[in-house]
Amino acid sequence: MKKYAILTDSSCDIDDTTAKKLGIYVLRMPLTIDEEEFIEGVDIDLTSIKQAMLDGKIVKTSQTQLGSLIKMYDHLLEEYDEIIHIPLSSGLSGMYQTALVQSQNYEGRITVIDAKCVCYPLTKLCLDVKEMLCEGKTPSEIKEAIERVPSMMEAIIIPSDLNYLKRGGRITPAAAALASLLKIVPVLSLKEGIIDVFDKVRTMKKAIEKGIDEAVNVEDPSQYYWMIISDDCDDMVDEVKQKLEKRTHQKVERHPFGAVILSHTGPGVLAFGKTKKLKKILDN
C-alpha cells in the first residue's frame, strides 16, 4: 500500500506540535514586518506579530521561497511514495501556481490541489483527505472532487478596525477615514477562495445578523463542517455559536486565528462559516 504525505502551509492555523499529532506536514510561510522578513512559527510567534500590528507596523505575508518548497518535497519523498499538497487558496496567494509548476519535476509523485481554503478549514480538509486515501480513493479522484466545487469554504469575516486594512493597502485611507467617521462596520466574505466586501452596516449586531443569514443559506447544513475562527472576541463568539447551532442544528467548532488572515484584517477579528465535507462530495 502506498504511503502518502499530506502537506499544507501555515495558513492552516496549526503549530508544528499539533500538525505532528494530526499526521500533517506544514510548510511555514514568511511574513514581513515593516519590510523585515520572518518565518511565522519559527523565528517569530503570533503574540509578537499581533503586537507589531497594534504598534502600527505594516505586516504582510508572502509565499514560501522556491528553495524551501523543493527542500520539503525532496525530504518527504525520501519517506513517502507520494505527496498531496494543499496550499493556501490561489485567490489569496501565488503558492498554488508555484507548487503546481514545481510538482511537474517529480514524475507524478506530487498532486497539488487548489481547495480555495484558508485557516483551520484547510486543516480539516487535510484530515478528510487522509481518511479518503485510507478508504482507497486516489489522489487524482480527490483532486477532481475538490476542484470541481466552486467554494469548498465560505465564511463571513468581521474585522475590528479598518486601519489594519488601510495599512496593508487593502482599502484606501480616504475610505477608511469615511467608514470610521460614519461608524460603519465592514462585513467581508470569503467565497471561491477570494476575500471581498459583502456588506457595510452601522452596528456589530447588524453585522453578525447579516453574516449568519448569509452563512446558513444552504439546503442541507449537514453537508458541511461549521466553524467560528476568532481573535480576542470571546463575548461575540459565544453568541454566534449559539445562533449558528440553533439555525443549522449542527455542531459548531471554535478555533483561533493564525497570522495569515490576521495580517490582512488585524487583531480582534471574528469569522464564521462552513466547509464542505469531502466524503459527501465523493459520495455524490
Image: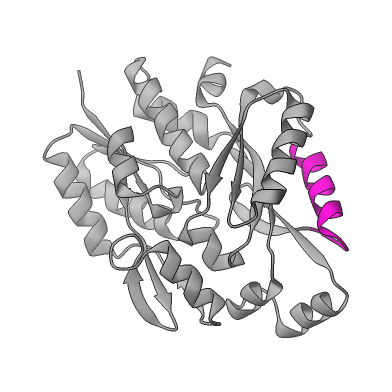
Asked if residue 212 lies left or right of residue 56, the reply is right
- Quadrant in which the C terminus appears: top right
**Depth order, front residue of 59/21:** 21
Point out the residue furthest to the front here.
235
| 31 to 35, vertically: above or below | above
Q: Position of residue 102 (x, y in %)?
A: 28, 53
Which coloring applies here?
one colour
Residue appearing at x 70%, y 50% in the figure: 235
> Residue at the spot x=77%, y=28% of the render?
246
**In magenta stretch: residue 97:** no
Magenta stretch bounds = 199-215
Q: Residue at point 84% right, 53% down? A: 205
Picture coordinates of residue 69, whole percent (x, y): 26, 56
Which residue lies most toward the left here?
78
Identify whether 273 is placed above or below 172. above
Across and down, in percent, residue 27 comes to 31, 53
Picture layout, residue 170 above or below residue 45: below
Q: Considering the whole magenta stretch, tell me its main secondary structure.
A: helix
Towards the viewer: 116 or 28? 28
